[in-house]
Amino acid sequence: MRKKPAIQLFFLIAALYDGLLGLAFLVAPGSLFRLFQVTPPNHIGYVQFPALLLVLFAWMFLRIARDPVFNRNLIPYGIGLKVSFCAVVFGHWVMNGIPAMWKPFAVADLVFLVLFVSAARVLKTPS
């Protein structure tokens, strides 16, 4: 099966999105919380750990973008990341509210989730 350019492109976009978001929350979390008028957690480590996880996932998405066929086994982990974040944000959004800061990220992750599931289906069967 030859590489799928569209799949490569949106995994590259996902890598840039999660990588830059992770780096932003790693190096300037206070500025982001102030910008969105959200009270930061009582310790910066609560932000730094998930920020570094985003950077790690960005690295994984780059690997998938480089060779989606060979690295298709990594796509379920990306799906799991997106499901987890969407479940938390949309769950709180519906049940008792959540700061607006998190809503655009959840909508973006929902789009990535749909694309990742589509990619997994396309890459499932070799041609």
Image (cartoon, helix red, strand yellow):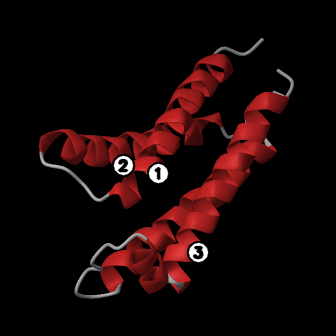
Left of 62 or right of it: where is 97?
left
Left of 15 or right of it: where is 90?
left
Q: Residue at x 34, y 45 (%)?
A: 84
Tell me the element at label 2: helix
* Residue denoted by label 3: 23
Tell me the element at label 3: helix
Q: Amino acid at mark 3?
A: Leu
Closer to the camera: disc 2 or disc 1? 1
Q: Residue at x 57, y 32 (%)?
A: 116
Q: Are marks 2 and 1 in contact (CB under 8 Å)?
A: yes
Q: Indicate which disc, 2 or 3, sits on the residue closer to the N terminus.
A: 3
* Residue denoted by label 2: 85
Is 10 drawn above or below residue 49 in the view shown? above
Neighbourhood count class around disc 1 (C-alpha, 10 Å): few under 14, some 14–19, many 20 upward: some
Q: Indicate which disc, 2 or 1, sits on the residue closer to the N terminus.
A: 2
Q: Quadrant of the N terminus?
A: top right
Q: CA distance from mark 2 to mark 3?
A: 17 Å
* Residue denoted by label 1: 105
Front one among 126 and 68? 68
Q: CA distance from mark 2 to mark 1?
A: 9 Å
Q: Where's residue 38, x and y in %?
A: 31, 72
Neighbourhood count class around disc 3 (C-alpha, 10 Å): few under 14, some 14–19, many 20 upward: some
- Return the mark for residue 94: none
Tell me the element at label 1: helix
Q: Where's residue 35, x and y in %?
A: 45, 75
Q: Amino acid at mark 2?
A: Phe
Neighbourhood count class around disc 2 (C-alpha, 10 Å): few under 14, some 14–19, many 20 upward: some
Is 92 drawn above or below residue 40 in the view shown? above
Q: Amino acid at mark 1?
A: Phe
Q: Where's residue 105, x and y in %?
A: 47, 51
Q: Residue at x 13, y 42 (%)?
A: 95
